[in-house]
Image: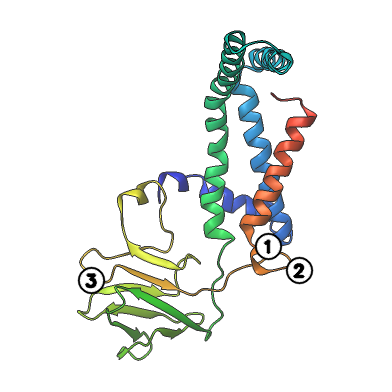
Amino acid sequence: MGLLDFPAPLFSWVDAVLMGPLPPLMRLCFWGVFGGGLSMLIYQVLSPQDRLAQVKKQAARALKTLAGYDGDFEGLWPLLKNSIGLSLKQIGLALGPTIAASLPVLFILVWMSNTYDGAQPQPGEQIQFSVAPDTQAIWLTLAQSSTKVAALRQISWPGLGEKIQLYDARGVALATLPLPSAVPVLHKRFWWNAIIGNSSGYLPAESDVEQIKFALPVKTYLDFGPNWLGSWEVVFFAVLIFSSLAIKFIFRIH
């Protein structure tokens, strides 16, 4: 588990227990509204709203003065400098709170990519996979027969109570199917996994195989339009942006 995965168990509990009766699309919209509302709340609390309102008015007056100026360039430069300075000051006042307000969304995104992106295959479903380097051979052992057989780049997904063990050509155990989560990529552990972990696990460092990627089913949440339109990313960010702008307008947040 990485640093950004820390609140994932809480999110999973809320999603499964408190919102379990709701359809997936409604739960997805909830997280968009929750992320937008929490981010705007943090921004409002941390940002100097009175100071921002004052600088915003000054910048508007400076821009109006600049637009109405009809003199030579020597007189234009101080007006232009003042306008740019006020705009940069406004950005400076809002930058820190904006970064802090984006952190909750980052935590939610990491959790949602594991929860709402892919789906576990049905038992017996034929799942293709790729290996890097692509010259590496993969073997599998069926737990019921303990027979090692050469694997093609396709696997019949195990059913309830069944296990399939994957090995590399040297006999190093790589992974056990089914995967613990619907994250389709297995790779060796890197330094950045201390920040974002892989919930499907990692390949052993001593193996020659660098990555295994399974073509797991992808979830969609809309019954119309192309598949990308119904992805969790499009739905989540659309709701997030709309709710954030609505809260900003209603509560007059600068």
Q: CA distance from mark 2 to mark 1?
A: 8 Å
* First-in-chain label (2 vs 3): 3
Q: CA distance from mark 2 to mark 3?
A: 43 Å
The circle drawn on residue 239 is none
Front: mark 2 or 3: 2
- Helix or strand or loop: what does disc 1 sit on? helix
Foreground pick, 208 / 238: 238
Neighbours of disc 3 within 10 Å: few (<14), some (14-19), many (20+) = some
x and y percentages locating residue 160 in the rendered image: 51, 80
Q: Residue at left 66%, top 32%? A: 40
Identity, as a three-letter code, of the amino acid under mark 3: Asp
- Compared to residue 59, the image places residue 174 above or below, namely below
Q: Residue at left 71%, top 48%? A: 239
Q: Is mark 2 in CB contact (under 8 Å) with mark 1?
A: yes
Residue 45: name its quadrant.
top right
x and y percentages locating residue 117 in the rendered image: 57, 62
Say whether residue 32 is visible.
yes
Q: Is mark 1 in CB contact (under 8 Å) with mark 3?
A: no
* First-in-chain label (2 vs 1): 2
Residue, disc 2: 224
- Helix or strand or loop: what does disc 3 sit on? loop
Front: mark 1 or 3: 1
Residue, disc 1: 229
x and y percentages locating residue 72 in the rendered image: 63, 11
Q: Residue at left 68%, top 51%? A: 18
Neighbours of disc 2 within 10 Å: few (<14), some (14-19), many (20+) = few
* First-in-chain label (1 vs 3): 3
Residue, disc 3: 208
- Helix or strand or loop: what does disc 2 sit on? loop
Identity, as a three-letter code, of the amino acid under mark 2: Phe
